[in-house]
Amino acid sequence: MDNVIKTGNVIRSGLIQAREKLHSKITGFAPKKYSNGPEFNDIISTGHDPESCKKAAVPPASIAILLCTYNGDRFLRDQLESLRSQRHQNLTLHVSDDGSQDGTHLLLKRFQSELGDECVSVKSHPNLGVVKNFLSLVCQSEIKADYYAYADQDDVWEADKLTR
């Protein structure tokens, strides 16, 4: 019986390590711990419990909003406020400015300082053109999310756009 328990613990440990490796490989991040439900170890050791799985905290999917700008300060304030008012809570905004000569860059930097560098990333380029500016944003390997949303500088989004 002791050998069975030891073997079960080894298998359980292997499953946990495999899950963590898979999670970090898919997301690029170490797995997070959530406290509103059973731990993975508890479910493995006690058996499947559908009720407690329903109650387990599931974080909202991450969404990266990709926004290209160029001389858009007359529109951008409304778009940034509509992004700030989104009901979905797990968002990051990634902006690529194509060498704006108006107040666009200042608006973006102010928005970034209000929300923090972890929520807003602003990159500036010297007149790449519309297509190259967009591709420079889309091809950034450090942008990782479950979903991607493309925004235009003159959009105004409804507060529930990303929760639908």
Image (cartoon, rainbow, N blue to C red):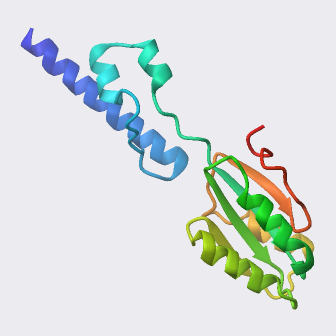
Q: Toward which corner of the image does residue 26 lie, by quadrant?
A: top right
Task: Kindly give the residue lying farthest to the bottom in the view shown.
Answer: 101
Locate residue 152, reporting x and y percent: 88, 63
Say which of 32 and 84 sits in front: 84
Location of the C terminus (image quadrant)? top right
Location of the N terminus (image quadrant)? top left
Locate residue 97, reporting x and y percent: 80, 78
Q: Is residue 74 above or below residue 68?
A: below
Query: Could you tell me which residue is drawn at 36 percent across and 26 percent down?
Result: 38
Q: Is residue 78 above or below residue 50?
A: below
Q: Is residue 7 above or below residue 77?
A: above
Q: Toward which corner of the image does residue 122 lie, by quadrant?
A: bottom right
Relative side of 81 to 140, left or right: right
Relative side of 103 to 60, left or right: right
Locate residue 29, reporting x and y percent: 47, 52
How many numbered circles are shown?
0
Task: Kindly give the residue lying farthest to the top in the view shown.
Answer: 1
